[in-house]
Image: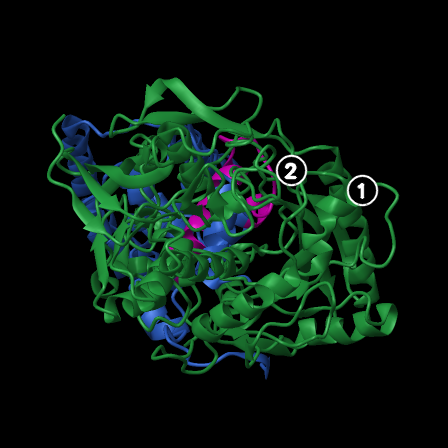
Chain colours: A green, B blue
Amino acid sequence: MESHLSQLYDAIVIGSGITGGWAAKELTERGLRTLVLEAGGPVDPATDYVEHVQPWQLPFRGWGDRALLNRTQAVQQQCYACDEWSGKFFVNDLENPYTTPDDKPFAWIRGRQVGGRSIMWGRQVYRWSDLDFEANARDGHGVDWPIRYRDLAPWYDHVERFIGVCGQAEGLAQLPDSIFLPPMALNCVEAAARERLHAAFGGERVLTIGRAAILTRDHGGRKACHYCGPCERGCITGSYFSSLSATLPAARATGRLTLRPYSVVSAVLRDPVTGRASGVRVIDAQSLEVREFRTRLVFVCASALESARLLLLSGIGQDSGELGHNLMDHHMGAGARATMPGFEDHVTFGDRPNGIYIPRYRNVNDAHPDFVRGYAFQGGAGRGGWDRSLPGFGAGFKHALLHERGPWGLSFYGFGECLPRHDNQVELDASLTDRWGIPALRISCTYGDNERAQRKDMQVTAAEMLEASGAVDIQPYDDEALPGLVIHEMGTARMGRDPSTSVVNGWNQVWDTPNVYVTDGACMASSANQNPSLTYMALTARAAAHAVEAMKRREL
Amino acid sequence: MSRGSGAAITRLLDAFPVTPYLLSVPPAERIMRRRDLLRLLGATTALPLLPGRGDIVQLGRALHAGLRQNADLQLLTADQAALVTLLAEMVIPRTDTPGASDVGVTAFIDHLLAEWFQPDEVQPLLAGLAAIDTRARLDYGSSLVELPEPDRVSLLTSIDDRKGAADSAEAAFARIKSLTVYGYFTSERVMTEVTREPIIPGRFDGCVRM
């Protein structure tokens, strides 16, 4: 196919999600004329955001068009957020196929639109500590991170000042405090559990309010949260952080941003003589027209699996044999739930889009005999309304649903670290192409023995803590979710100190093509147990500053 | 992190397996149902005129409301719709606030049965509905719609909150009950006039005395 005349940009960013938005902001603010290529279409908050649409305004009252979902979003609908409101923010699985071995199912949850998955992300943000950055070196799994907390701390500051993070400072070494906006409130039961856990475990096990990229007061031109609840449907006041509400507008304000939706990148073009990327090839998602754009710098921010796929297609970053390997997701869903007596006279007002957090306590100051690394809990307390099941019918039944509430439940839901393993991997599947003719991925990923050992311990210690909280009817559970469903996939172009065992260096530059930076989840050398987006954003901002300085020094 | 309607959706979805389905109602059957509807209309208009039977007046109201909704039935026959309307109104009767039949619960259930449920879920439910009526005839001597209210309450009490096979009276009532509750509390009228939860609360308070 014929290429159009090339256009030259200082930088090209592939993807407009949480890291692409940060790359766009940082590169344009540092003076680069930057082209952002987004595979999906534009999103207009005024018409596309639906957080205030009520169930009766939808054909299926929120249950979705089941037949259509089963046909076109069989994978995507496994994500809680892919419903009758937000399903449009998730891809059509028929257009975006992938394969897995039959015995290794993987749920690849994807959003292709301007803003990517930052529109419907979980918004939980936690710093890593050196407990995490030193983990690979300490126990020998994976390769050592070339960076430590001190390298990233100023970039965590930089990101947090911009995005706005609500939370409570706790002074924990394993979970450094962010620069916080005021915390959201714990409810009565959570506050009681916090105090009782403190009494039982001292500072070792701490229940704190979730740390979230949601504004609890006006910040940076965006409005404070109004507690309507379902952030994953969008937010017309921009109260939670997304590329669309914050970084892309900042980039646009520089006058140096060109944003091109419907631009499916099929290859990063590498000049074999210079060993540098010279541009990218794009397929127009609507017309299927192919064209190329030239550039001096490429930021690959397409999401961990898409970025690995693109590098595999481009023949970039393959020297170590690690590209596509060491895929990790967190593992979630083991813990315990219980009933909390004593607060029957109290309810909450408003829909807090946030829960509680119990930071990691395993393998912090001692060594657990059964597993390495650790896990944290999310969850919270609440009581059922009309949606609870009750025996009976008639006027009394109606009165109970309208005017009474169910018992308070309290649940601790675990999120654990996954170890990097070479055999958890993605590769190109020559037998299958997507809607745009690009080879699909074959994903092969399982959880291992260390994760299973953590899950057992999650149930035990969650139950211990519920008991210490004064809860009754304690029920441990293990609702194992498929790999992928935590939607924290990462590790497929890992960072390292040695080009023979890693794909990118300590500045996120691909070893063999240094003007290509990979700054999304692909670069992660380990997974820690914290939600990773904050770390991706900090790494992206740091890499962008490095790239601009390197260009000024004429190293790129 | 529970959220009223979201939690309800999750709970209900959990109850149903997710597999592809095909369902359409042939136009010929729809015409048949309109005939059924006319027959039902003829049979029920006299009921409210009977003196001294408060529950019958109530029943008449429910059936009338049902008939208004049933003009565009997608899947249920008029008889089935009348039964669903009666059951829904018994689950959530009109009191000082609207009842199930005031807010179109039958039409909501019919819509879901036609376009959301799969055939292998619909058929057992319809069989279970028929089983409820059969039980009324066997145990109380007449169809459910014609039973005096105490007998209807007695019958439903005997099948409420009990497990049964997919096509049992117990399973049908459980499903009609949960659909009634969901359809009622997610209806425009109930959300805007009865529960009136603010769409934009503006603040979060974690500990409010009831």
Q: Which residue is mark 2?
A: A420
Chain for disc number 2: A
| Residue at figure coordinates x 45%, y 46% from the top left | A518
Q: For marks 1 and 2, give the one nearer the viewer.
A: 2
Q: Which numbered circle lies on residue A503?
A: none
> Where is residue B112 drawn, in percent x and y?
33, 42
Q: Does the magenta portion include A244?
A: no
Classify A285 as above or below A257. above
| Residue at figure coordinates x 73%, y 58% from the top left | A360
Q: Which residue is mark 1?
A: A371
Quadrant of the rendered image containing residue B117: top left
| Span shown in magenta | B157-185
Q: Does the magenta portion include B180?
A: yes
Position of the N terminus of chain A by quadrant = top left
Magenta-colored segment: predominant secondary structure = helix
Total marks in image? 2
Q: Residues within 10 Å of mark 2 (few under 14, many from 20)?
A: many
Please state which of residues A15 and A396 is positioned toward the viewer in this rendering.
A15
| Residue at figure coordinates x 44%, y 33% from the top left | B18
Q: Residues within 10 Å of mark 1 (few under 14, many from 20)?
A: some
